[in-house]
Image (cartoon, helix red, strand yellow):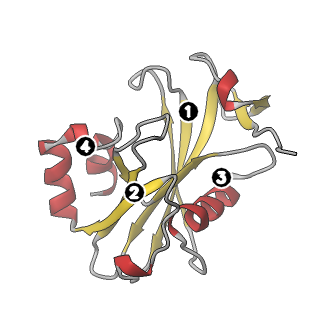
Amino acid sequence: MSQTRLIQHVNDQDEVLGWITPEQRADHHIYRVSALWLTNSQGDILIAQRHPNMNNSGGLWGPAAAGTVEAGESYHDNIVKEAAEEIGLTGIEFTPGPKVFIGKDEPGRTYFCKWFFATCDWPVEQFVLEPEEVSAIRWLSPAKLKSDIKDHPEYYLQGAHRWIGRFI
């Protein structure tokens, strides 16, 4: 028997109001997302390409791992789970970063995004990708990622331009 997936519905203060299914989510719902900014000891940044068949932003490049926080999870629980599921990353310490409110600049998406930071020197070949969620990963230098987002924003998640000022 399959279990219905429930995500946390929160108010504008990030306080849980209840739980909804992803299908019930509407423009007025605020939800929670966790995201991982993964670097290596040379300062390169790991980015992941979402599988083209994903409902939300399929085929676009985003952070190393990210996910919607489900009922019973904390932001931290979620990023640990998503990093393991999406790219096979385990045994790494995640440092809490900023929590950002994403609102009207992404139509149909209103959420809090809690960032986590980690460092890992794995080569790309060591990561184990979840093929239904992640098509590819790559390490990019900060300069290359910054120029790529500016030159080709259509290849990246809608909010990727925020990474430049916040993390690069």
Percent x, y of residue 125: 38, 79
Placement of 163 over or under 24, stated as above or below? below
Measured Cα–Cα span from mark 4 to mark 1 = 22 Å
Percent x, y of residue 159: 36, 38
Q: Nearer the viewer's eye, disc 3 or disc 2?
A: 2
Label 4 element class: helix
Is residue 95 visible to the viewer in this orientation of the structure? yes
Q: Nearer the viewer's eye, disc 2 or disc 4?
A: 2
Q: Nearer the viewer's eye, disc 4 or disc 3?
A: 4
Q: Amino acid at mark 2?
A: Ser
Measured Cα–Cα span from mark 1 to mark 2 = 25 Å
Residue on which disc 1 sits: 111
Residue on which disc 3 sits: 75
On the rendered structure, is 96 left or right of 44? right
Measured Cα–Cα span from mark 2 to mark 4 = 13 Å
| First along the sequence among labels 4 and 3 | 3
Label 2 element class: strand
**Quarter placement of the C terminus:** bottom left
- 10 Å neighbourhood of mark 2: few (<14), some, or many (≥20)? some
Residue on which disc 2 sits: 135
The residue located at (16%, 51%) in the rendering is: 148
The residue located at (47%, 35%) in the rendering is: 56
Do the numbered discs 1 and 2 sit on residues whose CB atoms are within 8 Å?
no
Q: Nearer the viewer's eye, disc 1 or disc 2?
A: 2
| First along the sequence among labels 4 and 1 | 1
Label 1 element class: strand
Q: Which of the labelled discs sits on residue 155, or is there none?
A: 4
Residue 95 appears in which quarter of the rendering?
Answer: bottom right
Label 3 element class: helix
Q: Amino acid at mark 4?
A: Tyr
Placement of 21 over or under 153, stated as above or below? above
The residue located at (57%, 48%) in the rendering is: 67
